[in-house]
Every structure is written in structure tokens, then in C-alpha cells.
Amino acid sequence: MKDLYTLRSLAGSLQNMALSNNVIRPINLVAILLSIPVIGAGIWLATEADNSCVKLLQWPVIILGILILVVALARFIGGFWRIHWLLILYLVAMLILIILLACLVVFIYMVMIKGSGYLAPSRAYLEYRLDDFSGWLCRRVRSPYKWDRIKSYLSSTQMCPELNQSYRMAQDFFNAHITPLQSGCCKPPTECGYTFVNPTYWISPINNAADMDCLQWSNDQMQLCYNCDSCKAGLLANLKKEWRRVDIILLVILVALIWVYLIGCCAFRNAKTEDLFRKYKQGTYT
């Protein structure tokens, strides 16, 4: 009777396993597809001009996405050909990758949580202070060597000259919603009290002592406020906006990967049940 009960239990488990495998096959494909947004997010960051200058975390994201793809393919091959050691490798490697991805999501959130802009009096655009950002981000732009390279790139773009074409009158410019980089690099800080001539030409400061950036401002169109801390802060604010989008994508992928991983664990357990049932049929089960 005991053997009959055991046989029925194993048969029931095998039926559940067969039903589960019908779900596992498309889930394996989902795990492979989940790596694509991670790789895509890293490539998108690498092609963004500001990220390519600062070179923060785009390569870790790309590498992590590639590793997820490789491990998911290992799971797919192991499940298709019933290669036991590949399934074990998948469970161990994917757990490590999920932990690394979770750490990356938390890290990005922690370093990007600081640094919100503030509204200057009678202005529609935001202004930014470097000290408001996390120390880790600030260190990426405070090095003179690094900043000279970034500044050289920024001064070669059209982000400041295009403001002169878009805004002729002072009030139109004050009511404009310009980018963080334009706010920090193309004009002096509002508290300096400069008088508007055009978006990149300002005269007669009232309070040069209000901020060190007031002394850094130059009407030389190749200099402007590229040496200002406000320009560095504007760059970080731009990075923050882009990285927050990526962090949301990575968080969604993380949740989906955990779901896929748990299903993979169930599939592995069911495969072991099938193996026990086969051994029982062959008379080798003890």
C-alpha cells in the first residue's frame, strides 16, 4: 500500500510537471528577451552626449545585460537538451546577476536622489547648485582634467547659440523652460544681478559677491559659464534625468527576472521529481 501511495504521488507530481513545462518553455524565451532592454538602456546612455563625456555606469549596464542574455541562453539550452549541470549553473549565476542588478538599481537611486533644481525669482527655468548633488556624482566633474575635456565638448555644441535664435526679448527668455545644461552653462546665475542683452550676453552685474560663478561668467562665446559650478550642476541634472529613466527600466526588469527565476526554480524541482519517478519505474528508487 505504501508503494502504491508513493507511486500515485509521483504520478501526480509528474502530471503537474508536464503542465508546468508548457509554461516554462515560453518563460525561457521571456528571460532571454528581458536582457534586451538592459543592453538597449546601456547603449542609449553610451550614445547620449553628456553620458559619453562623463562615462558613468553605461558599460556596467551593458555588461550586466549581456551576462543576463548568456545565462538565460544557458537555461534555454539546458532545459531543451536536459543538461542537468547547465540548469544548476543557471540557478546560481542568475541569482548572482539578480543581486547585482538589485544593487545597481539601489545605487543609481541613492546617487540620483539628490540635486533638485530651484526656481530663481521671476524665472520659469530652474537653476542648480553643485553642492546639492551627491558627493559621488560631484567627484565625476570636479577633476580639472575631466572637466576640461567635458567643457571642450560642451563649448563646441549649439546648445547656447540656439538660445539666441529662439529668444530675442528678456521676458521671453525668463519665461522659457530651458534645459539644465543651458541654465547652468549659457548664462550667469540670476543672483548675480546681470542685465540681459541676449541669452548669452549679460552686462552690469549688481552683486558679484553673491556666488563665485558670478566672477567666472564671460561674454566670450567660447567661455560663457563653462567654468562655473552651475554648469557642472546642470550637466549632473541632465544625467540625473536620463539615469532615472534607466533606473525605472532596470527596476521593471529586476521584478520580471525575479518572477522568471522563481518559475525556473520550480521547473528544476519538477525535473528532479521526474527523475525520481523514472528511477522508481526502473526499480532503482529507494
Image: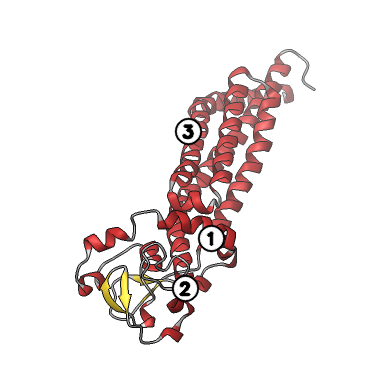
**10 Å crowding of disc 1: few (<14), some (14-19), many (20+):** some
Residue at 60% across / 36% down in the picture?
A: 67
**10 Å crowding of disc 2: few (<14), some (14-19), many (20+):** many
- Reply above or below: 32 against 212: above
Considering only order in the chain, which callout, 1 or 2, is on the residue closer to the N terminus? 2
Tag on residue 147?
1
Q: Which residue is mark 2?
A: 129
Q: Quadrant of the N terminus?
A: top right
Q: CA distance from mark 3 to mark 1?
A: 38 Å
- Reply above or below: 27 against 224: above
Which is nearer the eye, 277 or 155?
Answer: 155
Residue at 59% across / 59% down in the picture?
A: 145
For the question of whether residue 6 can be seen, the reply is: no
Q: Residue furthest top?
A: 282
Tag on residue 65?
none
Q: Secondary structure at mark 1?
A: helix
Tag on residue 33?
3
Q: Position of residue 71 (x, y in %)?
A: 61, 32
Residue at 48% across / 65% down in the picture?
A: 232
Query: Label 3 amino acid?
Result: Leu
Query: Label 2 amino acid?
Result: Arg
Q: Quadrant of the C terminus?
A: top right
Q: Secondary structure at mark 3?
A: helix
